[in-house]
Image: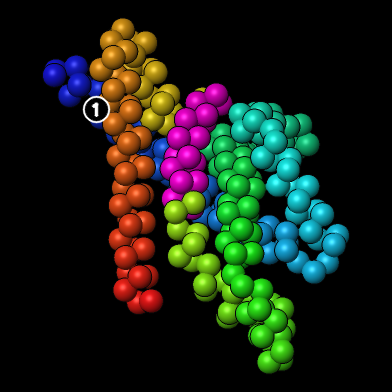
Amino acid sequence: MGYSIKILPFLLKGMQQTLILTAASATFGTLLGLLLALARIAPARLVRTAASGYVTLFRGTPLMLQILFIWGALPQVGIVLPDTACVIIALSLNAGAYIAEIIRAAIQSIDRGQMEAARSLGMGYGLAMRRIILPQTFRRLLPPMVNELAALTKDTSLAMVVGIVELMKASQQQQSQSFRPAETYIWTALGYLLVTMTLMSLATRFEKKLEARG
């Protein structure tokens, strides 16, 4: 028990860094994912092809490779960023590719007749998307988006490869000093579980509110 009390402040500090990485990457990744999803179903073929190529690239290569590439390649072209910024960029770019497919699938699950009806009323494609299609996708987006955010939280552990002391790196440091891996990693696992369970709980509440309004 004494050991647990001793290491908890260090793990909580690592957890704070994990939450910062998750929140920033989720925000930028969601915005990017929305743009990519709209590009994936855009009328212009060139736009669809470019978006598809982006999604294929970032879903088809390891996230660790993407982190190391951005962290190591940008300084070679004169762009020097803090390690945290490099990781957030990599996580956001990667999450954006996955979120794009989630949003695209949700949009395409809406009856195509609704778009046709909106266009027949004189709405442009963009206006019909904003006012008719996108508002209907929120409920369908919720479960897969929660899963993606939970996965993103766990993916932040890869930040340790560039020396960022997030939850996993903090637990590794404490374990190497104490040689008590069982207790250290149990507390680490509980930390990740706390975040993912909180996300699921918030999603459930939000879903119930949507059902009540619907």
Seen in the image, is 58 located left or right of residue 186? Answer: right
**Front position in the image: 145 or 169:** 145
151 in magenta:
yes
Q: Amino acid at mark 1?
A: Leu
Q: Please identify the residue farthest to the left as the structure is shown.
A: 1
Is residue 96 in sight in this rendering? Answer: no
Check disc 1 and report its element: helix, strand or loop: helix
Is residue 14 highlighted in magenta? no
Please identify the residue farthest to the top as the structure is shown. Answer: 179
Q: Nearer the viewer, residue 17 or 32?
A: 32
Write the start and end of the magenta stretch as one range: 145-162
Q: Position of residue 120 (x, y in %)?
A: 72, 89
Which quadrant of the structure image shows residue 10? top left
**What residue sits 50% from the left and 26% below the top?**
160
Residue 174 seen in render: yes
Residue located 60% across and 64% down the image: 109
Disc 1 designates what residue?
8
Residue at the image point whose x is 59% and y is 69% from the top = 110
State which quarter of the image contains the N terminus: top left
Please provide percent x and percent y for residue 131: 58, 80
- Report the quarter where the C terminus lies: bottom left
Q: Whole-percent x and y of residue 3?
A: 19, 17
Give the x, y percent position of residue 42. Answer: 76, 66
